[in-house]
Each structure stands twice: as structure tokens, then as C-alpha cells.
Image: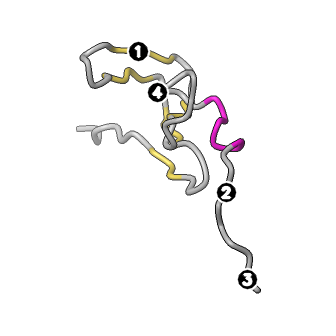
Amino acid sequence: MPADPVTRVVVTGEGPLLVDGPLEVELPGGARVRSDRPVVALCACGNSRRYPFCDTSHRRRVRTRQEPS
């Protein structure tokens, strides 16, 4: 018996979640969106105009880290 296929999710830490596709995402309201790409970038910051998919908006966020004196 072959093993069950496993979906790989990569947490990048500074950007999107990378998920092996194709995949279907169910949104909070019940709507479903699909991507047929082999690797799908899911938004982790909430700023994407293409949510739930990443549009690299996380790169444009202003960081508020204070520099050491």
C-alpha cells in the first residue's frame, strides 16, 4: 500500500507561506479559491490585495524597529 501523500508547507518567516499546489483555499465566508500553480504563496501578513494569495505587500511594510543608541 502506498503512503498517503503529504502536502509540504514552508514557513518563510519574513513573507508568505509556500504550499505545494495545486490547492483550494476556503475563506472565512465559505468562498473557495483555487490555484493550479505547483507552489502557491499564501499571504501571512494580511496586506495582500490578492488575499489569500501573496502579492509581496509584506516587502513594502514600514518596520518600526528602533535602532540601538
Q: Which residue is mark 2?
A: 63
Query: What's the amino acid at mark 2?
Result: Arg
Residue 17, x across and y down, in percent: 51, 43
Residue at 57 percent of width and 53 percent of height? 12
* Residue at image point 47% right, 22% down: 22
User: Which tag is nearer the camera, tag 2 or tag 4?
Assistant: 2
The residue at the point 49 percent across, 35 percent down is: 20
Residue found at the very far bottom of the displayed protein: 69
Q: Is residue 48 left or right of residue 67?
A: left
Residues in magenta, as a range: 55-60
Q: Residues within 10 Å of mark 2 (few under 14, many from 20)?
A: few
Location of mark 1 (residue): 33
Report how far apart the C-alphas of labels 3 and 1 lie in the structure.
Answer: 44 Å
Q: Secondary structure at mark 4?
A: loop
Mark 4 vs mark 3, CA separation in Å: 36 Å
Write down the residue under mark 4.
Answer: 52
- Cβ atoms at labels 4 and 3 below 8 Å apart: no
66 shown above or below 55? below
Q: Secondary structure at mark 1?
A: strand
Task: Using the image, tell me which numbered label, if any, was put on residue 68.
Answer: 3
